[in-house]
Amino acid sequence: MTTETQKETLGFQAEVKQLLRLMIHSLYSNKEIFLRELISNASDACDKLRFEALSDGALYEGESELKIRVAYDKDARTITLSDNGIGMSRNEVIENIGTIARSGTREFLDRLTGDQAKDAHLIGQFGVGFYSSFIVADKVTVVTRRAGLTAEHGVQWESSGEGDYTLETVSKETHGTEVTLHLREGEDDFLSDWRLQSIIRKYSDHITLPILMRLEGKEEDTAVNQANALWARPKADISDEQYTEFYKHVAHDFEPPLAHVHSKVEGKQEYTMLLYAPAHAPFDLWDRQPRHGIKLYVRRVFIMEDLDKLMPHYLRFVRGVIDSNDLPLNVSREILQHSKDIDAIRAGASKKVLGMLEDLAENDKEKYATFWREFGRVLKEGVGEDHANKERIAKLLRFATTHADTETGDVSLADYVARMKEGQSKLYYVTADSFAAAKNSPHLEIFRKKGVEVILLHDRVDEWLVSNLPEFEGHALQSVAKGDLDLGQLDDAEEKQAREQEQSTYKDFVEKIQAALSEQVKAVRISHRLTDSPACLVVDEQEMGMNLERMLKAAGQNVPQSKPILEVNPQHPLLALLQNEADAARFGDFSQILFNQALLAEGGQLEDPAGFVKKLNSLMLALASR
Ligand code: ADP
Ligand code: MG
């Protein structure tokens, strides 16, 4: 006996133990789904074999008819699922079912609340496929052999789902996987043709491979599912439940999707697509290497799961299948990289997905709000990424604005335009690194006073978004912190005149402040933006905004050195105080304080915080002693 054939006991990751306990608990009310999950895995394993066999036909070992079998044994109280798919090597067994090698496991567990209903929802999101066997089984035995390895490289994995599992090298004649569930006490009603058949019909009818059972009293196998491609059936013949179950399989998701689009495209390229928007973001949405994508079929034959060619990056949350009539059956990843046909399919499919989202936005605001909460930040990338569809994507965007002043933004640009004031020609926005900073920005004061809505941007991606979206339906997007604020028709003649008056009244005063701050600012001027604050910082129209500058610096980028403009509000009592300050040194300190305050209000960082505090304190004392 070599060391490899010895039975060895291995421990699950600590997280797995916790997860298993939780899952058994929270999914118990819907325990029959274990069968759906095991069938889904068997089907995936067959797909993988088919893909690998494209370049190495010997992997089939003479049997290219892929199938799944479900059997049970009343006396032994077991259910056995077998497939002749790709199987697993010893290492793959350890990797795939001995660990949960998924980024975010820890964070996931931290989010659990202990509340069963909520946790069931989360568990579903996490995707616990294989482990769901332990809902009904107190022992699970997996015997598997990877296609391409010889019979003596079989592996037997066994666990009671409590903390460890055993691994043993065994001999297995056929490639593929056999999963045996030893049922828990009280689960015997699963040991029936009728029960198993009806679960399979309910959840797994869409599986394209035959799911075989040897029914009682029969001499040969019966396929208990339809085993044809769901997407190839006419829409009218597909129920909502069938669409949903198919989604759960392709997306490895426990929750129903938000929406789907099922469409056949004819023309230069002929293909059918059945694509879905999930109801929640997967844990790997921001990973470089997502685990799932779109399944590509050619004339009903599964080819591969594609992660980045069939959908643009900003639609990477979409799941489903695309079935081409034109691509060659032996299409490889390399061919996909440079295929004009694939480019055309991606363009067509993107349009359909946008149509699906438009439809949702139009007809089901609540669902669209869910979609936006989960995927809005990803969709925003599309404005810069997909020039052909920029306008359509812009209409799908949702924002927080000063209209409701709440963080969950549901305002579309069209809503904004519809609420524009008489004489308003631009869409105003402010960017900051948090919602609170955006909402309380001093730059908004005049807009609030005049009742002009301002879009409150506080996502990191927003800076990139606005730099790619100079206008919406002919209206320029304008930062409230840039340029010499011109409210155009929003100001009446009287206000304009009053301003001009102010410019000359305070000319000398402003120049004096500027002299005191010549190191820090490019200019000082009278502000028309402020009503309550004494001062704020702005930059010139064509310059980089201060929020973006900070973001780039934080990311370690070289940012050209530029100075902001200080705007002061002469109506503010502090400025009246400053104006009356005769002591030149104190005037200088006071000006410094004004500048540093404005910088803080911006979300900026002081160069010399201790110096600022010292100046502030001495000024407070001086004022107090007056
Ligand atoms: P998922 O299907 O979402 O990847 P599962 O928990 O259902 O998660 O399965 C975990 C992994 O175990 C699969 O990704 C696959 O690598 C492996 N696996 C499970 N069942 C089989 C099977 N019947 N044949 C081959 N590999 C399997
Ligand atoms: Mg699975």
Image (cartoon, grey):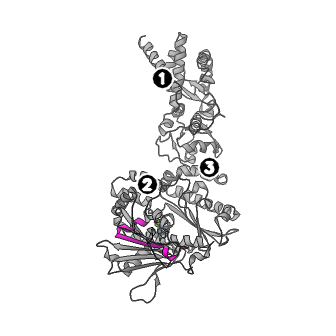
Q: Are marks 1 and 3 in contact (CB under 8 Å)?
A: no
Q: Nearer the viewer, residue 246 or 418?
A: 246
Q: Which residue is mark 2?
A: 105
Q: Secondary structure at mark 1?
A: helix
Q: Are marks 1 and 2 in contact (CB under 8 Å)?
A: no
Q: Which residue is mark 3?
A: 383
Distance in Å between CA atoms under marks 1 and 2: 42 Å
Q: Which amino acid, mark 1?
A: Ala
Q: Which residue is mark 1?
A: 610
| Magenta stretch: includes residue 142 | yes
Q: How dense is the environment of label 1, judged by Cα within 10 Å: few (below 14), some, or many (20 and up)? A: few
Q: Is the residue 233 above or below the residue 8 in the image?
A: below
| Earlier sequence position, callout 1 versus callout 3 | 3
Distance in Å between CA atoms under marks 2 and 3: 32 Å
Image spot of residue 118 (x, y percent): 37, 56
Ligand 1 neighbours mark 2 (CB distance < 8 Å): no
| The furthest residue to the front | 1
Distance in Å between CA atoms under marks 1 and 3: 43 Å
- In the image, taking residue 547 as reference, residue 406 lies left or right, namely left
Name the disc covering residue 258, or none. none
Q: Nearer the viewer, residue 211 or 498?
A: 211
- Marks counted in the figure total 3
Query: Looking at the rendering, in which quadrant would you find the N terminus?
Result: bottom left
Q: Secondary structure at mark 3?
A: helix
Query: Looking at the rendering, in which quadrant would you find the C terminus?
Result: top left
Q: Secondary structure at mark 2?
A: helix
The magenta segment is 130-152
Q: Which amino acid, mark 2?
A: Thr
Image spot of residue 83 (x, y percent): 48, 76
| The furthest residue to the left | 186
